[in-house]
Image (cartoon, grey):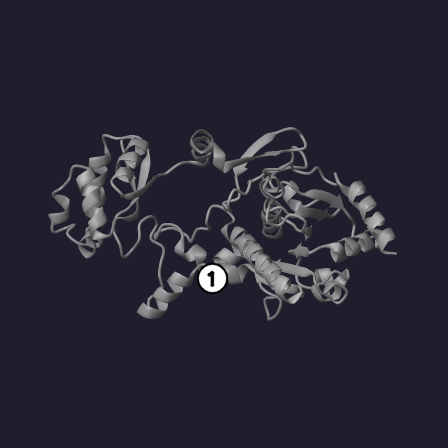
Amino acid sequence: MSISLPLQGLRVIEFGQYIAAPAAAQTLADLGASVVKIEPPGGDASRHAGWSADDCGPMFCAFNRGKQSVVLDLRNPADLAAARELSLLADIVLQNARPGVMEKFGLGAEQLRAVQPRLIYASVNGFGDAGADATRPGLDVAAQAESGIMALNGDAHADPTRVGFTVVDLMAARTLTTAVLAALVQRGISGNGAHIRISLIDVAMDMLAHPWAEYQLTAEAPSRCGNGQATMAPAADVLDTGEGKLVISAYVQDHFARLCHCLDRPDMPSDPRFCDNAARVANRGALREALTEALAGMSADAACAKLTSAGVVCGVVRSVDGAVEYARTNMPERLVTATTPGGHELCFPALPISIDQMPRPGGALPALGEHTAMVIESLARACSKAA
């Protein structure tokens, strides 16, 4: 028996550049929605971000599988009219232009929803829709900097460090997707659509709820400390093994005892330097030295397997290539395939959602404008029938 995807039959129009809106649209596509990506002449800027070999660079490949690509020049009246009609026929419109840009083209939320009140219109930008910062251009790194994320990331004696991937963009995409799904539920009850607004700075600050609480309760601003956690040990400590590195968290007393027993160091829990969490934090250097010595005879993978069997939280520190190859070998069922227009077959993590026996599809990556003629012809037929 074939199982339909949850959003099958829903139509999405995406006016997206780079990551936040495109990644949200890809999630909706993975859940079964039909996604038409409206691209300007030259395409989504992510097609060529750090890439010149063709029109399908790494950033575009990561967030645009399973979509239809339609090229429309919104400065051209006929193309603008087509974009408007496609939006009015959709269930969901996603866009991540600066505030005011879509309104200039007559494609703003209120302009479209005045004609189609069931439309769910979702906007994401850098610094919100109002206030002094609203017109600022906003990318992931600016939100990381201004929210405090960079101040918490990196070594204490080095410059603040951005997270090594676009964490705010991706969390914004997930937040946007969550809001769209909530609006779909609301529409099912009330019959009315919604205008959803997400900003990168709000998403970034939301991720720092724990440091906010720490600062307000202690009157001290949390600071970056590299690996490990300032008030717990061992907690997120990276340790060398005989081959590779391992991260371990075993600061709960019972977990620490398990760790020591597993590493044949039953003396450590009673050692005054390590007898409780406060002592271990105060003697973190000696603790790391003792644990590294105990791990020296094992590879990181063997140590991880041994500690895991004892109920200790740990993980092998893998490079990106190591993580990809580990996934290909050990968890192929969690991967999907995306094929580029040039014939390259790429694997990606599948949508990390399991609903009953729902399939988790991959999808082709669209060539620039690949579906323009087909979609415009379909639009013309739809308008003809409506007339």
Observer-nearest residue: 74 or 219?
Answer: 74
Question: Which residue is farthest front?
Answer: 1
Disc 1 target residue = 206
Which three-letter amino acid code belongs to the residue tagged 1?
Answer: Asp
Q: Quadrant of residue 263?
A: top left
In percent of width and height, residue 190 lies at 64, 67
**Residue at left offset 78%, top offset 56%:** 84
User: Within 10 angstroms of label 1, few (less than 14), some, or many (20 or more) residues?
Assistant: few
Examine the rendered structure and indicate whether residue 91 appears above or below residue 355.
Answer: below
In percent of width and height, residue 102 lies at 72, 60
**Residue at left offset 62%, top offset 65%:** 189
The image quadrant where one finds the C terminus is bottom right
Is any part of residue 66 visible from this angle? yes
Left or right of 82? Residue 364 is left
In percent of width and height, residue 185 lies at 59, 60
Observer-nearest residue: 255 or 126?
Answer: 255
Q: Which structural element holds mark 1?
A: helix
